[in-house]
Image (cartoon, rainbow, N blue to C red):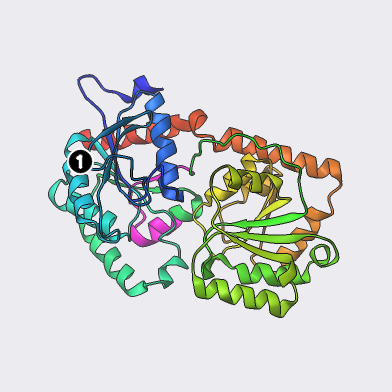
Amino acid sequence: MGSEFYKPNQKVTILYPIGYYYPAQNGPGNSIFWLNKALYRQQIPTLAVAMDWNIPSDIERDVWLDRNYGKVQYVRTKNYVLGWRYIIKSLQSSRQANVVHLNSIYAPTSFIIGMALMCFRRSKPIVWSVRGELSQEAQVYRGGIKKIMKGVLRLFLHKHVHFHATSDLEKEYVKQCFGLDIPIIQIPNLLELPELEHQKKRTTLLYLGRIHPIKALDILLKALKLSVTFQGTDYKLIIAGEGDLAYTLHLSALALELGISDKVEFIGKIDGKAKQQLLAAAKALILPSYSENFGNVVVEALAQKTPVIASKGTPWAILEEKKAGFWVENTVTSLAAAIDKLSNLDQEEYKQLCQNAYNLVQTTFEINSNIDRWIRAYQQVLQVENN
């Protein structure tokens, strides 16, 4: 696959300015890390410029490091919201790259890098992953600033800017914001699958992710109050993650008000092997959300043979199509019914659901077997440059 990416007498390098990057952990950073590793295996050079956010102190700063996922430079940064040294290093490094792949629209650093490239290096191809930022629900937060930023972007967009969407829904959001003719690459987040953890399934429902009002966890708690299975058995809900403190306190108070606080546990952030074991032991992962562009945690759950219940604010209709879980309305009654339906499956039905989950992730979301999709996308971007 790697050989067809190259053109005679043309050295191809892709630059990823990414604020948060391995060994630091977050969704976009992990996605780009896995992508870089897969491209490296195809002998496609990559450069990642990152801020030194949560990077161990023994890792060198401000120098190019050769890794088995390409070259990376961690820029010493004091202000992680507006890291000027990181911005300058990213723009300098863009001279060495044929394609620049950005990973946020509204993050100030990404916005400034993109604007500088569009203004002063207009022939430089850009792939711009929107990471769920264009959903209607996400626009509510700091809506005035985001409206101004979108307006400025529209003024400077040109044919060398290709947006990346992870789902049909996100593709529609891009069109609504930037026009029907804007170039769009649609590829789901592809993951390097973790080792399969062989854990005994427990009567545990799991939410894992950012705690924020957009995630509709209050709807989930009310659904659990309504669920016959949850109320009448030893089932419990584990909420793993960090986020909005006020909303977290609201959820704790709501669980107490509903009389289910003894069956709801907040465990904070969890990573690494402990996270994989938690996913593997859960009866189901539940993703209730008003809006979600993708949801890496869904793929991680499927990779541990754990079925998923996702709301229709998320792009996970494929769960129903492949019989790997349930995709339901984001309402109290619908979530409660899905929880009861999954819990009442007999042993063989549930076992098949788990195997379907694993089959789905292997065929559709495993990055090494699907890396040709990204290679073709970068080819497409370069062809626009040469036309």
Q: Is residue 327 left or right of residue 148?
A: right
Above or below, 379 relative to 110: above
**Residue at 32% in and 74% down:** 144
Q: Is residue 175 left or right of residue 168?
A: left
* Residue 15 picture quarter: top left
The extreme front residue here reads 58
From the top left corner, tell me how far across and down residue 296 is, in percent: 53, 48
From the top left corner, tell me how far across and down residue 225 is, in percent: 75, 71
Q: What residue is shown with label 1?
A: 94
Quadrant, the N terminus: top left
User: Which stretch appears magenta?
Assistant: 172-188
Above or below, 149 relative to 1: below
Q: Amino acid at mark 1?
A: Ser
From the top left corner, tell me how far across and down residue 307 is, in percent: 69, 47
Q: Is residue 387 visible?
A: no
Q: How many marks do you count on the picture?
A: 1
**Residue at 58% in and 42% down:** 273
**Residue at 46% in and 42% down:** 187
Q: Is residue 384 left or right of residue 103?
A: left
Quadrant, the C terminus: top left
